[in-house]
Amino acid sequence: MGLAGIVNEQVDKLLIPALLPENFYPGKTSMAALGIYGASFKLSIFMLLAIQAFRYAGEPFFFSQAENKQAPELFAKVMYYFVVVCVFILLIVSLNIDVLGKIFLRQPSYREALYLVPVLLFGKLLFGIYINLSIWFKLVDKTLVGTYISLIGAAVTLMVNWMLIPVVGYTGSAFASVLCYGLMCLICWLWGRKFFPIPYNWMGILLHLGFAIAVIYLVDQFRPENTVLNHLINILIPIAYIGAIVVFEKKKLNIKIT
């Protein structure tokens, strides 16, 4: 499972130099293109840090609540609000990527692939959803399922990178992670319904994800010419989002934990 996970995270760094056609990016070698992609990949660390923090705290919590009669409902709520927090991170980083790029990537050449950061962040978000979904095979002691799913994900990563890098360059690697983790989520959820059914609020989760994608796209398409107004909008949208969650859903957070 660990080896498959490494493939999912690192194989694109090996395949881009190997599969990228010569002069695909005019004036840049394949290694230079890899450096540009790697610089944008590093900015997905904001999502990855949140997921790792959740992982270290979440798994002991899941195990401690496994015998609770309310466990399925509780796990569903955890998933829902995990997605809410991750969507907030996706919004605030994606909408302010130009500013963050200038702060963390001082060389202008390294900022050429910043448009991929929302895609990379979304891929990491799907990985976080998979972390939530995967708790079922750990609780019922069927961890070999995780190996199978990870191997499928690794195969998808290799295949999509092999198909797309020669056609769309490092953009294909970014979308490969989305397809990989999206498929892993789907398989894990379908498999888990038989052994440990959890009433996930998929409608709400998909609405939040769809909202984030739509907002990021629309803001990018209709940026105001006024720089100050542009930055203000990019900051206020994530704040308004999380504020609306607190106002409209605070009552739903009440659940007894034993």
Image (spheres, grey):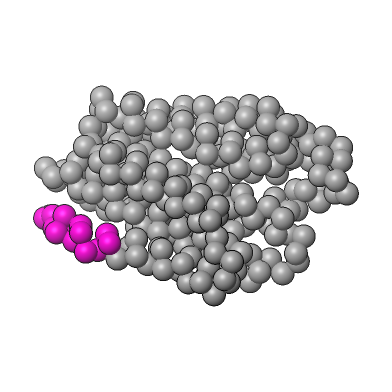
Location of residue 112 (image quadrant): bottom right
Is-magenta flag for residue 245? yes
Q: Which residue is pictured at 28% across the width and 39% down the height?
A: 203
Left or right of 217 on screen, residue 256: left
- Name the residue nearer the viewer: 193 or 114: 114
In x, y percent, where is residue 10?
A: 64, 43
Left or right of 255 on screen, residue 207: right
In x, y percent, where is residue 80?
A: 29, 48
**In the displayed structure, would residue 3 be above or below residue 58?**
above
Q: Residue furthest toward the bottom?
A: 228
Q: Which residue is pictured at 20% across the width and 48% down the height?
A: 74
**In the displayed structure, would residue 163 be above or below residue 61?**
above
Left or right of 232 on screen, residue 9: right
In x, y percent, where is residue 4?
A: 56, 35
Q: Residue furthest toward the front?
A: 225
- Give the magenta range: 244-258
**In the displayed structure, would residue 59 be above or below residue 200?**
below
Q: Quadrant of the C terminus?
A: bottom left
**In the displayed structure, would residue 101 be above or below residue 199?**
below
Left or right of 236 on screen, residue 11: right
Q: Which residue is pictured at 50% across the width and 56% down the height?
A: 219
Whether residue 201 is visible to the viewer of this picture, yes or no, is: yes
Whether residue 8 is visible to the viewer of this picture, yes or no, is: no
In x, y percent, where is residue 230?
A: 53, 68
Location of residue 228 (image quadrant): bottom right
